[in-house]
Image: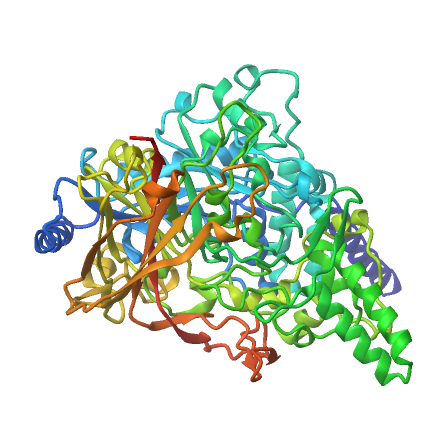
Amino acid sequence: MKRYIFASIASILLIVAVYGIGFVNDWYGDTRGPGEITGAERSDVLMSARQAEMQAVMAGLEEDASKQILFGDLHVHTTYSTDAFMWSMPIFGGEGAHPLADACDYARHCSAIDFWAITDHAEASTPQRWEDAKQSIRACNAISDAPDSPDMVSFVGFEWTQVGALPDEHYGHKNVIFRDLDDDKLAARPIASGGVTVDALRTNGKDLVPLVLPLLDFKNRQNYFDMRQYLAEAAAVPLCDANVPANELPVDCFEIADTPGKLMASLDQQGLDSLIIPHGTSWGFYTPTGVTFDKHLKAENRPDKYPLFEVMSGHGNSEEYRPWRSVFWDEEKQEGVCPQPRADYLPTCWQAGEIIRERCLNAGESDEVCGNRANEARYNAANASVAAHLTVSGTEIEEWLDAGQCRDCFLPAFGYRPGTSAQYALAIRNFDGPEPTALTIGFIASSDNHRARPGTGFKNVSRLTSTEAVRLSETWRKRLYPKSDVALQSEMLEQEAVAERGFGATEMERQASFWTTGGLAAVHSAGRSREEIYDAMQRRETYGTSGARILLWFNTKDGTPMGARISASEAPEFVVKAVGAHKQKDGCADETIDALGADRVQKLCANECFNPSNERLKITRIEVVRIRPQSFGGENVDGLIEDNWKVHQCKDDGTGCQFSFSDPEFANSARPATYYVRAIQEPTEKINADSLGCTYDDEGNCIKLNICYGDDRTALGDDCLSPVEERAWSSPIYVDYVKQ
């Protein structure tokens, strides 16, 4: 009997030991693939009905019917992106894998958009994942048997996800979209940005999923094993030789380009036709304080290579310029200086000082001592960049109020950086060469969805599936966001320490209240083919919307379309026409259920699809923005950006709004001018439209928050809806002055 007991114990110990060895050595992770596309082509009847309705609208507006407006999403992630994989984990209330096949089916049948692109992060790509992306997109595209007029066009792309610790090292994120699907017309491999993110993923990426997680959440252990496997596969790809031209490199190495210029050089060496699209530029979640867009105009960074600019996504709006700054950057000392608060802006570094001052006074210290501690706290926070909130230990997120946020922007990106906004980018010029350099960009919007759901903005339902919101349980919230002891003095954080924290340095908690359903890209295209849609994007005949499918035309009276650059001695007459989006019916159309099946419609679409009624929302006004680019180096842009320069109040009876305008000051100014318009729609409800839900005092200060939390503190079914005026942004028309 004793022998039997000892043998049993020994067997158990051996099993535990073997399991433990496998546990430590990651034997149990599975490689997740691209999934299987299940949906069929959209019905000809449905496509014909939509085309007929569009033709009727254009006829009513006396608009040129040779081009049609198509809607798409050029910024979509699956669980082949590290952050998307992470957010799919059970600890974040995730649904599990979101493969490429899901994105194809969702775009075609749930959101029913006309085109989309896969843009998974290059920083964790592998040769197999790149091959999967290409093959899955080809399969998605091949479902339509009408190549000249397909029901949907799918593009291959990747995201170059650069983050710099200091302002002069930061270039931000860019999507790279390719026209064609043949191997010789696609990048041999996604091109990563290098730096802290890549170093962390390649050296200790598996630490993102500590081995303790499968033990703490044992029933879901396979998810954590799979992600560790995913990270190990990325780290195993050998680095490309930086001294070998991109077109001579093997396909199975990991390529790095640490500046936009090097990214574009690699694409040029491979002879590729691509669109490079900056996005999330004003999103302060990862963007260092003190950054501006100026260095993008330097010749080595190829400003000529940006045809489009993403002004809006589910991460917020990056359109609007404001004269305030989160931090004043001292170039000589290479340090941040905390600005004073304004009626329209509370710097995060300033609020850090106020929190410390209040704690200090409550502890019975003198005004002088507390004032000195407050000043020290402001300095420390100003030089901690995105980790400013970590310099004051023991804070609750409510103590930060609306610090660092744009109070009067439309659906602003978190921690707003106005020096990297679209309006600022249009106002600046570079005077280093014989002729000034300026950007000529078209506007789009997209979702930046990380759940393989392109085009989510058609309805504002199901916050936890249609936005980037997560829902932590109380247990995981306390583990992921532990609260340290309340400190009476702030802490100085070294840049190296901030870098080592990675995403742990960012304000994940307050950010949860800023996720929205994202925007859409629209093109004025001569047809539905891949070539026609891509050509429309190249010539910048595009616009963006905040999610609603608003129809917008912005031309000169003689037919010059949005996105064009012209020369004139007098300003042209501009013509604007806009029609509101369809009101949506609940649920999904029968065609969608027939195509996907009821179970997949429930799982993928959450039983809500693009399902238009015959009634459209009304356009309430059209706003015109005029920007006069710098005429000399260092010219203050504050007076060059006129928003709103003109406003036309609409009397829309359901058929749209139109008006004409010109600029009587153009000729006398003798300087170039840039014009674009916003079409504003009647209010509807949108997820997180009120972001932090501030209560303001009589002086306009935020004194209390009503946050939409990314955890158990917000009810499971609460979509955090508030009214918002959805809008569309036209691409600018650029008018260069020439003397008559």
Q: Nearer the viewer, residue 663 or 497?
A: 663
704 and 175: which one is in front?
Answer: 704
Q: Exactly how many numbered labels are in the figure?
A: 0
Question: Which residue is rendered at x = 27% and y = 34% of the image?
Answer: 530
On screen, residue 549 above or below 700 = above
* Quarter of the figure with residue 725: bottom left
Image x and y of residue 488, in percent: 86, 74
Query: In which quadrant will I find the C terminus?
Result: top left
Q: Position of residue 134 (x, y in %)?
A: 42, 33
Left or right of residue 573, residue 447 in this image: right
Q: Which image quadrant is residue 178 in?
A: top left
| Residue ID at (51%, 28%) | 302
Q: Is 708 placed left or right of 504 in the picture?
A: left
Give how far across and how far down residue 82 sits, in percent: 58, 47
Q: Is residue 271 above or below residue 531?
A: above
Which residue does the image show at 49% across and 52% down from the upper left? 639
Does residue 72 appear anywhere in the picture? Answer: no
Residue 174 appears in view: yes
Q: Is residue 626 above or below residue 394?
A: above
